[in-house]
Image (spheres, rainbow, N blue to C red):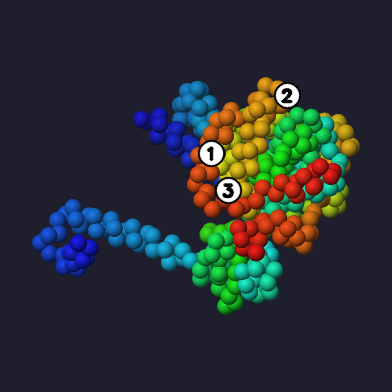
Amino acid sequence: MKTVKILAGIGILSLFLSSMGCGGSHSGQSSDQPDLIGGLGTAFGMKQEKIDLLKKGVGVVQALEPIGEAEEITLGEAVALEAFSRFGGEYQNKEWTRYINLVGQTIAEVSDRPNLPFRFAILNSQEQNAFAAPGGYIFITVDLLKTLKNEAELAGVLAHEVAHVTERHMLETIRRGAILGSVSEFTLTAMRKDPAMFSNVIEEMSELLFTKGLDRDKEFEADVVGIEYAYRAGYHPQGLRDYLKTLAREEGKVQSRFFTTHPSTNLRISKIDGLLKDYTDIKNLPFLTDRFQRYVKAG
Amino acid sequence: MRSDRFLSLQTPGTAWTAGSRLFYLALLGCLITLWPSLAWAASLFAKQDGVNVTADKVPTSAVVETLNLGDEVRVLSEEGRLVKVKTAAGKTGWVFKFRLTEEKPSTGGGFGLSGLTGKTTIAAREARAGGSIRGLKESTEQYAKTKEIQQEHRDAVDRMTAYSISPEELMQFKKTGNLGEFSGGAQ
């Protein structure tokens, strides 16, 4: 009991000193803080393993500071470089780019972060996929775009990605990850001063986005929120479900990292079917098949 | 039955046990807690700048006022995807309800220190390499050089960041597709 009180006391004292600015700059704080804790712990006669446990705890508390919007946009810009670099570069088609931006903006302005500058681009990749980097950088591959049947499907896919951004899924994941776990301040200045740390964060995000995928719960949440956004924008909210049906039929036949970075397609469809029952006034909302065909087939 | 309960509240006599006192105290506490939200239930706030309040339900009708981020309106009635509101300036009109929110939005750019500037776009521009409006941000430029990312991909990100659509074009797009403020029979 006495040890617990000492641990709690040192923890509170360390956090107090940290909040008073005793930790110094970002890079200094991560190294100075453990020394402070270590010194106090030793003075109170604590064992080394308990001091290590406390250091870890303080690191987690520090990592809980949310990442600011300007920092988020900078992270997104760097991840966007990786997206273009890994997925065949930009698919250059002015009409299609304008079209996906018009659909994307229609969704973004009814989202929960309408003031974030969302941008949409097409990747020249022959695998079906779509990504959302922080800060509103949204990507769809040309193969996925060509597979869609109408504008409601496109809106459903883009709304799912917009939802990842509005719910800050990637940011929340890396904020609790190994690299930012020991960083207490993540500002634009800190990014510029410590390019190695910035580079490590981008690599961690790219690994999550392009290889490992986010948690299943975050994918399901993006389905729920994305469907709501598509509905608010005035599209028939069944669009995402219809595209997933197409994808499920192609599973095993087509190559895509989509299958390894997302939960089971059939499980998602099943959950969406349940969700759509709650939308009672969607009967007359449009799919806009003709307009989609005009834009995409003409391109 | 309902009046009996009301009477027992008005005439607390011998029927008031310790248990019932506790119950009514808890009820009173709930009412006090909920009162502010009940009182403000009819207030909504603009989610962004440029939210139009129109004279009629038709989104292309005369604009009586344009709301800025955080501006408060009182809801007078609701019809489908539209709400009839009264603005702080006393003007009455119609707004697409998904451009409004129940909670007063922050006018800042985010949670972090840079969000305190209140102008995200300025903060983002300041971070660009060489101080120019176009071009990658300093950290991204540094990252691209270290990772030897091809110039064509850097240019693609630059184009993507700078991409913009005029409000008029977006409005026309929504109108022809019956989307946004034109959706759900609102036109």
Side of A71 where A39 appears, left or right = left
Q: Position of residue A199 (x, y in %)?
A: 75, 33
Residue bearing the label numbered 2 = A255
Identity, as a three-letter code, of the amino acid under mark 1: Asp
Identity, as a three-letter code, of the amino acid under mark 3: Glu
Q: Position of residue A203 (x, y in %)?
A: 72, 30
Between marks 2 and 1 in the image, the one whose residue lies nearer the viewer? 1
Question: Where is B100 relative to A229, above or below?
Answer: below
Task: Please give the label number shown on residue A273.
Answer: 1
Q: Nearer the viewer, residue B23 or A161?
A: A161
Q: Nearer the viewer, residue A184 or A76?
A: A76
Q: Position of residue B40 (x, y in %)?
A: 46, 65
* Residue displayed at 67% across by 21% down: A252
- Do labels 2 and 1 touch, CB within 8 Å? no
Q: Quadrant of the C terminus of chain B?
A: bottom right
Disc on the earlier residue, 2 or 1: 2
Residue lying farthest to the right in this orientation: B151
Residue bearing the label numbered 3 = A228
